[in-house]
Amino acid sequence: MPELRPEAAATLRPLIATVAAAPAESVFVAPPADRAAEINGLNWEELRRSVAACRACGLCAERRQAVLGVGDVFADWLFIGEGPGAEEDARGEPFVGSAGKLLDAMLAAIDLRRGENVYIANAVKCRPPGNRTPEAGEMATCAPYLRRQIALIQPRVIVLLGRAAALSVLGESGSLASLRGQPLAYAGPESAGSAIPVVVTYHPAYLLRTLPDKAKAWEDLCRARSLMRATKASAVQQT
Ligand code: URA
């Protein structure tokens, strides 16, 4: 091992020892430089296989299975959460636990149903241990998969559920309160056309704990529905 300056050694030696002692599969594997470009060329089936086999970050160590997403791959609506929880990890589908039931009710409130013109995905595809919030590095490693999903689906409106999704998709680390109601848009590197309008709202798991904020989520959903109508109307005008 190269000699370390004393001040660096104090910080680095414990880290080096931790990494050396960790089981191989829990150590972060640096993605190859062209990983994002490779993922960007995948079709749905290839994407599914790639996500199922992914070992690009430490989350793979404790997952039962990776959870790609669920729904209509031609959907106008894309809802993005944080990451699978225990039930999602067991069943291989996003939002199937109690937060999922609330998400279904939120969809129904604006006349939507899971799987019908709606796709549901997460910022990370593997369950963070103990259902913790995914770390920024884990979301960054998983982001090429999410970006590819967005590029393949080409939704008209994206609804981000919670701060983790906002950070992953928009790179916005502000408070949820500061992001709600803002005119936000996603313009991924792959999006050849115009940017996709984005609405940030509360995560259903948060709403289960904080019932008074349900009214604010309802406002956000109504805003998303108006944006959808406007996007469709402008598409009709352009034809
Ligand atoms: N919470 C999420 O963010 N995603 C899920 O799939 C389930 C719970």
Image (cartoon, rainbow, N blue to C red):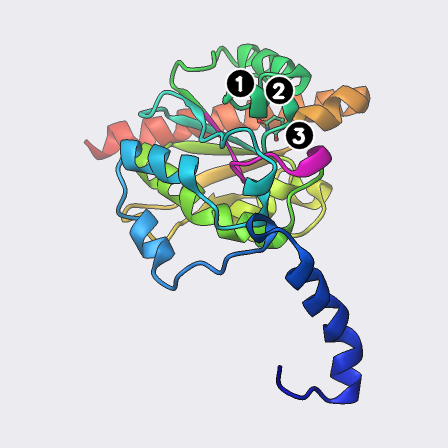
Q: Is residue 123 magenta?
A: yes
- Kindly report the distance in space between the C-alpha atoms of the residues bearing marks 1 and 3: 20 Å
Name which of mark 1 and mark 3 comes first in the sequence.
1
Task: State left or right for residue 142 relative to residue 195.
Answer: right
Kind of residue indicated by mark 2: Glu
Question: Looking at the image, can residue 154 be seen?
Answer: no
How far apart in space, not on screen, are marks 2 and 3 (Cα)?
Answer: 17 Å
Which of 55/72 is in front?
55
Q: Check disc 2 and report the residue beneath it.
A: 87
User: To which residue does mark 3 refer?
Assistant: 203
Crowd tier of the residue under label 1, counting other residues whose Cα lies within 10 Å: few below 14, some 14–19, many 20 or above: some
Q: Which quarter of the rendering shows the N terminus?
A: bottom right
Q: Is residue 191 left or right of residue 120?
A: left
Magenta stretch in the rendered image: 120-131
Which residue position holds label 1?
91
Image quadrant of ligand 1 equals top right
Could you say which is closer to the camera, residue 203 or residue 35? 35
The quarter of the rendered structure image containing the C terminus is top left
Ligand 1 within 8 Å of disc 2? The answer is yes
In the foreground, 84 or 7: 7
Residue under the point 33% across and 27% down: 233
